[in-house]
Amino acid sequence: MTSTDVDKQADDSGPSGYAAARLRLLTEGARSGPPRRTALSELTDDWLSGLFGAAADRLRGVSLVAVGGYGRGELSPRSDLDLLLLHDGGDTKAVAALADRIWYPVWDLGLALDHSVRTPAEARRTAGEDLKVQLGLLDARHIAGDLGLTTGLRTAVLADWRNQAPGRLPELRELCAERAERQGELQYLLEPDLKEARGGLRDATALRAVAASWLADAPREGLDDARRRLLDVRDALHLATGRATDRLALQEQDQVAAELGLLDADTLLRQVYEAARVISYASDVTWREVGRVLRSRAVRPRLRKLARERSDFLRRAVVGDGRALGGKPAAERSPLAEGVVEQDGEVVLARAARPERDPVLPLRAAAAAAQAGLPLSLHAVRRLAATARPLPTPWPAEAREQLVTLLGSGQPTVPVWEALEAEGLITRLLPDWERVRCRPQRNAVHVWTVDRHLIETAVRASEFTRRVGRPDLLLVAALLHDIGKGWPGDHSVAGEIIAKDVAARIGFDHADVTVLSTLVRHHLLLVETATRRDLDDPATVRSVAEAVGTQSTLELLHALTEADALATGPAAWSSWRGSLVADLVRRVSAVLAGDLLDEPAAAAPTAEQERLAIEAIATGGPVLSLRAQTEPPAQDDEPAVPGEPEPLGVELLIAVPDQPGVLPAVAGVLALHRLTVRTAELRALELPEGVEGSVLLLDWRVAAEYGSLPQAARLRADLVRALDGSLDTAGRLAERDAAYPRRRGVLAPPPRVTVAPAASRLATVIEVRAQDAPGLLFRIGRALEDAAVRVRSAHASTLGANAVDAFYVTTPTGSPLPRQEAEAVARKLEEMLRG
């Protein structure tokens, strides 16, 4: 039955006829969604046209115009009627009488009415003064009367909007931001406002306005469907409550879900959240593009002046990287990682990037963006989603490291993760994520959906990476600790099974998989025990110790517990809870305490290491070798991965006659050549009988920040100069940093330097936990040299973006440092790193 058929069953010239036809339309079970909204708009148009025609037979230069949501033909059952009576300024008394004959029947039916009577000039002037009026007029639609009058207003309003857009769009963006601050984010609220909350219908309307300005456009994939879904939910809410409301209250969600034919209220909320997420992401991308365009317009006059002054140069310009085309300077592209560059305030793929050949590129690009505090460009994410190769199972080491770097980047992780998720890359990397995506948590303590809570926990955990020896395990445990909430039963038990599978898939070894599954299984253990059990009962403490197993796992669980609580909401953590958990951790730690190990025993030197050492003694200088490392071959029960083995980096072996300054010299040379140190070990090597002298062996794994590796001969030559003092490493690094200042995207936790008590009987162990950065080992080594201590051995590792290093140091005579002296060295080293 069409709206015209409905009209024929009733006398639509009067309120009662329209009311009956309207009721019939709204109670038709077979019609819902866009068809019903369109039919309701057409029915209302016909009724209002009848009212207008009956009163305006002799009146010219007047038209009735629908604006706002009614202008878009989106009438929900209890929507306001937004109407403008437009006139040419002639017989104002007759126009006022016409308005009364239209408005009063609407009010008689109890319909909400937003109305105005204006000339085109008045409408344009009011729009110029009130942004909300202008937005409503952008959707103006003719209902009855003088079509030319309506068309003229529409044309003029659109022209005004496009001319004024550079000034009005920032105002619109500010309105959207203020509304989001006031109403919250639709995709996380348990009782969301479908219209006003961020990601709701108002934001969808704002995107239409931006598109009408011709300055920028929203990513359209999924946007219309998301908007339709929210409108469908609002229709069902109006019918369920009988009220004109946009707030989806808890007590009405089951009824609304039933009205829409959905399984339950959780299914309803999940659909709402998914729609809101699409609109929110489209808004982020669109407003970013608006800002870019407006900035470009602001600098264009200066660029034109520069072009005139340098016309000769511009005429000679050619197409290419860093060049100009047709006299227009090309956007600057700064490298961030292999295949990843920054351009125009966004992270994009390098021109030489080949996602189809580089399965780690999505994670590398995401990690680089988060570390730089920059958004991933929409084009880059879509290209990665369309062309990137799937990662092999298990993941290569670089992929795991890039995931850890992404998770450890703090708050910038969130928008980058959302960009990946918007294009389906997260569920492609972690299929188990699908069950927690947009999943509501019906708990007043929780402020996020399950998936966002997991990311927020990783953000919080990134603040605690200096408290633990394995920040990579902490960050991955934060990501997975509630992964079982997508399954029936105890989510900790289900999560333990999933965590084992995920951890093995992303390449952790058996011992790390065990730790991660333990953390997920017992992520609630500390807080529940501390707040519900008697800590003075030895059995209580003993049971926690048995569940945790080791000091390192306890350390990780303590940090995870606090991160989880802080990411849950303000009611989930307090100083009181924190003190109880800390007390429990101290008691459990005492139970787990045992004899600490001495300096790790060095493995017997290989034939190659002995060869390098003997050559170093013979030549009196450093010798080195570079050897590529690859992933071990798959086991028989693992699927073979096509193609070449994935490179882990390059093993750099250096043998140097024992002398002061070896650590900072080597680290400084590597930094100059833009080599990232992933692991590093320094130790004295025992030489075969008959060979006199003492040799230091450095066994490091390195990788180029971007580009190719330097030649071994160049590394050796620079190392010789660094050791004899003819290469000013510190000055060269300072010059480079001054010329190419690194973007400070991530506010990392401050470095932490501690003395490990009784960790070795032969040396003093100084532990450094800091944000990894070029030249970090150089700075640490030089500080230790300045402190006049001898480095017996060093054990450095990079876990994501975190450096976790241990230095076994002695006095020049070879004995451990006195306690006060060791603490002074650690304090000065920490001050240097913080400075």
Image: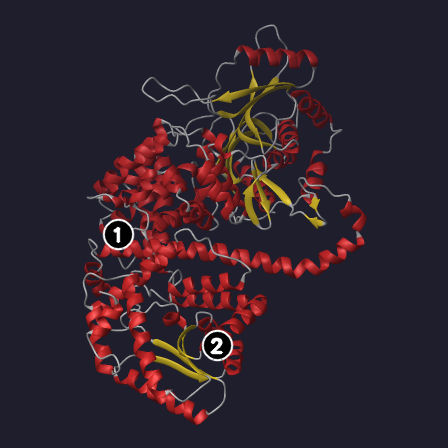
Residue 540 coordinates in the image, percent (x, y)? 23, 43
> Which residue occupies 54% across, 21% down?
628
User: Image check: 276 left or right of 603?
Assistant: left
Q: In this view, does 695 lie above or below 41?
A: above
Residue 817 is left or right of residue 46, and the answer is right
Identify the residue at image location x=56%, y=72%: 160
Q: Which residue is drawn at 53% across and 56% down?
A: 288
Q: Which residue lies furthest to the front in this view?
A: 58
How many marks are shown on the rendered structure?
Answer: 2
Residue at (38% x, 91% y) in the render:
97
| 288 up-or-down from 52: above or below | above
Give the distance between the C-alpha atoms of the residues marked 1 and 2, in whole angstroms. Answer: 73 Å
- Residue under numbered circle 2: 148
Spot occupied by residue 171 in the image (x, y as percentages of width and height): 52, 69
Q: Provide the residue designation for mark 1.
A: 531
Q: What residue type is labelled 2?
A: Gly
- Inspect the image, locate mark 1, and give the three-letter code of the amino acid beneath it: Thr
